[in-house]
Structures are given as structure tokens and as C-alpha cells.
Amino acid sequence: MSPLKIAVLISGGGTNLQAIIDSIKNGYINGKIEVVVSNKKEAYGLVRAEKNNIDNIYINRKEFSNDIEYNNKIISELKKRNINLVVLAGYLKILSEEFIDEFENKIINIHPSLIPSFCGKGYYGRKVHEEVLKRGVKITGATVHYVDKGTDTGPIIIQESVRVEDDDDVDSLQKKVLEVEHEILIKAIKIKEES
């Protein structure tokens, strides 16, 4: 079977990107990251890509007159590379409907909660963990899901839970959830590779 051609979209440090890189290197995933795209110039994920000889691009939204044009630029970069799977790994921008139509059922996202809890518009990064602690829930976790035209509303591929301890703060909770994110994102990509 030919390797899965993967594009990873990021906005930050790229720890989930690193998990994908490692799982390809160790042979767990039969795939190749063809390109890493970031909407943030200073995203450390671009450095991770560079260190692993992966093509990487920073695309500045301010250079485009609207979100559709910006998304069309990303679409053209991915189509050039015949991408089979788009992985949103901490990518903090909403994709256009055109983007979702172009890669229907080929876009997955990692979210730091057990969807349908603590998801949707405005729920990303530390905000998710702050709300989990504020509400006093005892179990949280991470979800990998397909991307559809809603925010965090696509079909769920895999979830994993983590216990919220009494002494957890935002940082400790974020760290625990991130470890689970790395595991289930790799499993979800493996599921896509085998389907």
C-alpha cells in the first residue's frame, strides 16, 4: 500500500506534529508528511518540520483580502502535493466551506476535551481546561474527529479520558490531556491509513 500523503496544519509548538513524525519514523504509520502549514510565523512546529526535512510554509492571513482567498492558497498548496489526509494539530483558524468540500472526509482535528463537552466556538487551548476546572468535572480527555462545516461537530473517530484530580491546575491538566492527544491522534491516523 502506498504511503499516506499527510499535510499538518499548526499554529503553535507542534508537539502533536512531533508525535506524527515519530510514529512515521518508527514505522507505526505508513505515511509521509508532505507539508506543514502554519498561520503563525513564530510557530515552533515550523522548526520541528525544518529539523526533520519536511517542507513547511508560513501563510500570512494578512496578505489576503478575505478568509476564502487565504484558505484557497492552502488548498492549492495541498493539491499540488496530492494530499490524502489533512491533520489539524493545534491549528487555530476555522477552515472555509470550500476547504472542507475539497477534502471531504479527509480532514481530522484533535480537540482537548471529550466532545460534546467543552467544544465549539471559543473553546481551544487553555480556555478548555479552565472551563473543565471551573465546572468541577471529574473526567476530561481528548477527541479526534472528522472536520465538517460546524465547529467541533464532525463524527468522532476516537476519544480517551483522563481523570481530573483535586490538585490539578490548568497547566497540569493541559499536560495530562496533551499526552493523551499524542496517543489518540496517532491511532486515528492509523485508522485512516488502514481504511
Image (cartoon, rainbow, N blue to C red):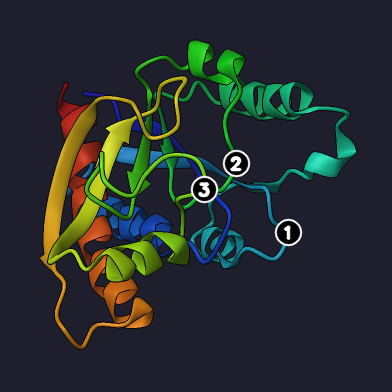
Q: Please tell me in which quadrant of the rendered image residue 106 appears.
A: top left
Secondary structure beneath label 1: loop
Q: Nearer the viewer, residue 183 or 178?
A: 178
Label whose residue precedes the other's in the sequence (1 or 3): 1
Residue 127's place in the image compared with 10, above or below, is: below
Number of labels in the image equals 3
Q: Is residue 30 visible?
A: no
**Where is residue 118 drawn, in percent x and y?**
33, 49
Q: Residues within 10 Å of mark 3 (few under 14, many from 20)?
A: few
Q: Amino acid at mark 3?
A: Gly
Q: Please tell me in which quadrant of the rendered image residue 120 appears.
A: top left
Marking on residue 93: 2
**Real-space Cα separation, disc 1 to disc 3, in angstroms:** 22 Å
Q: Amino acid at mark 1?
A: Lys
**Where is residue 156 drawn, in percent x and y?**
21, 31
Q: Is residue 22 visible?
A: yes
Label whose residue precedes the other's in the sequence (2 or 3): 2
Q: Of discs 1 and 3, which sits in the foreground?
A: 3
> Residue at coordinates 73% horizontally, 59% vertically from top-left?
41
Q: Amino acid at mark 2?
A: Lys
> Residue at coordinates 34% horizontally, 46% vertically from top-left?
110
Q: Is residue 118 left or right of residue 159?
A: right
Secondary structure beneath label 3: loop
> Residue at coordinates 39% horizontally, 59% vertically from top-left?
128
Secondary structure beneath label 2: loop
Marking on residue 122: 3
Marking on residue 41: 1
